[in-house]
């Protein structure tokens, strides 16, 4: 489970792109927030695969990573590209497939290799086509899934939704929220899982995010308040999630992406409703 939001400059108070994400994971899983420094390598060792390395030095970035995994839930790089992913289920069953790149691997690869949002889209889609997507997103449970991605830079943002190696891309025109379901209209019509209880577990969170984005101007404070809130579905399936023994919000990030200046990042490791966001960049 995860919720991602973006507001481009016309919709924000300071005229800077804002990106936000809550990462919902197993409640006892540890995430680490860390700087990943540039490197050069012939082979990149991801969570389950070894893939061809990047020809240039990788980008420095700040990312939040489940401690057992190579990939990251969300992050921001030195060029001002922010990215995050969320679990989605489609008509294609991810179980039984081969181990390949996870959605979190693709987030990290985009942050390491792209200096624009459209470049991040190209990294995600090209590597998806070359290496595939698969492998459990949980350390102690075989739970593979597909991913949606939200990527942004100071002037643009895109949604990428996937099902296996199939994907769709949609450019954000002003504001956008994503959650644990297909949202690109044409992709949703073809790929939505027919039995996923989106009306109960997903749509209330997505609608809450959309309401905050619609109340322009969007601010860092309004995003923080949303990510700390318990708006959304029943049984703990809220923006700040608390489903005992199943799922909880274990990390959160908000990034401000100004043109021509370094990004500003606020992060929480743990539940946003009981923790303070700290400026980390």
Image (tube, helix red, strand yellow):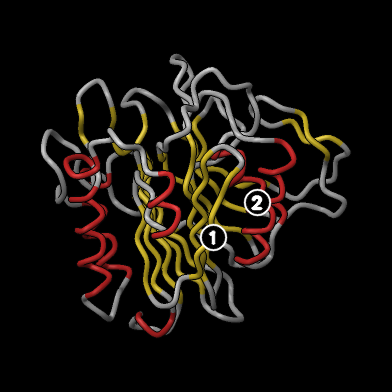
Counting every numbered tag in the picture gives: 2
Q: Which residue is mark 1?
A: 169
Which mark sits nearer the N-terminus, 1 or 2? 2
Residue closer to the observer: 81 or 142 = 142
Q: Position of residue 167 (x, y in %)?
A: 56, 50
Residue 196 image offset from top left, x and y in percent: 28, 35
Going 31% across and 26% down the picture, which residue do you hit?
27
Residue that label 2 marks: 125
Residue 275 placement (x, y as % from top left): 27, 45
Q: Are marks 1 and 2 in contact (CB under 8 Å)?
A: yes
How far apart are labels 1 and 2 at the CA level?
9 Å
Of 272 and 122, the residue lying toward us: 122
Q: Badge 1 local density, few (<14 within 10 Å), some, or many (20+)?
A: some
Q: Residue at x 71, y 48 (%)?
A: 37
Element on which disc 1 rests:
strand
What residue lies at 40% left-to-right and 25% top-to-bottom?
29
Question: Front-most of 229 and 197?
Answer: 197
Query: In this picture, is 268 found above or below 215?
Result: above
Residue found at the far left of this picture: 234
Q: Identify which residue, 147 or 110, lies in the foreground.
A: 147
Q: Quadrant of the N terminus?
A: top left
């Amino acid at each position: 489970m995860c919720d991602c939001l973006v507001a481009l400059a016309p919709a924000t108070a300071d005229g800077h792109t804002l990106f936000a994400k809550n990462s919902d994971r197993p409640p006892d899983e540890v995430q680490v927030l860390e700087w990943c420094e540039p490197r050069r390598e012939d082979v990149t060792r991801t969570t389950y695969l070894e893939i061809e390395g990047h020809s240039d030095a990788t980008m420095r970035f700040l990312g939040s990573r489940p401690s057992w995994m190579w990939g990251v839930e969300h992050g921001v790089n030195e060029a001002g590209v922010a990215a995050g992913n969320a679990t989605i289920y489609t008509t294609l069953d991810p179980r039984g497939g081969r181990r390949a790149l996870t959605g979190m691997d693709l987030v990290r690869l985009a942050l390491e290799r792209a200096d624009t949002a459209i470049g991040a889209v190209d990294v995600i889609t090209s590597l998806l086509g070359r290496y595939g997507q698969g492998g459990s997103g949980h350390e102690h449970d075989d739970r593979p899934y597909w991913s949606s991605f939200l990527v942004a830079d100071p002037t643009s943002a895109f949604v990428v939704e996937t099902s296996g190696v199939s994907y769709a891309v949609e450019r954000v025109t002003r504001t956008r929220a994503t959650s644990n379901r297909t949202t690109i209209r044409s992709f949703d019509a073809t790929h939505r899982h027919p039995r996923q209880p989106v009306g109960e577990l997903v749509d209330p969170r997505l609608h809450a995010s959309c309401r905050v984005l619609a109340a322009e101007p969007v601010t860092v404070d309004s995003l923080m308040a949303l990510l700390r809130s318990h708006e959304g579905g029943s049984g703990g399936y809220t923006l700040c999630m608390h489903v005992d023994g199943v799922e909880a919000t274990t990390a959160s990030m908000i990034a401000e992406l100004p043109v021509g200046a370094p990004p500003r990042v606020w992060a929480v490791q743990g539940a946003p409703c009981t923790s303070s966001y700290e400026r980390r960049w």
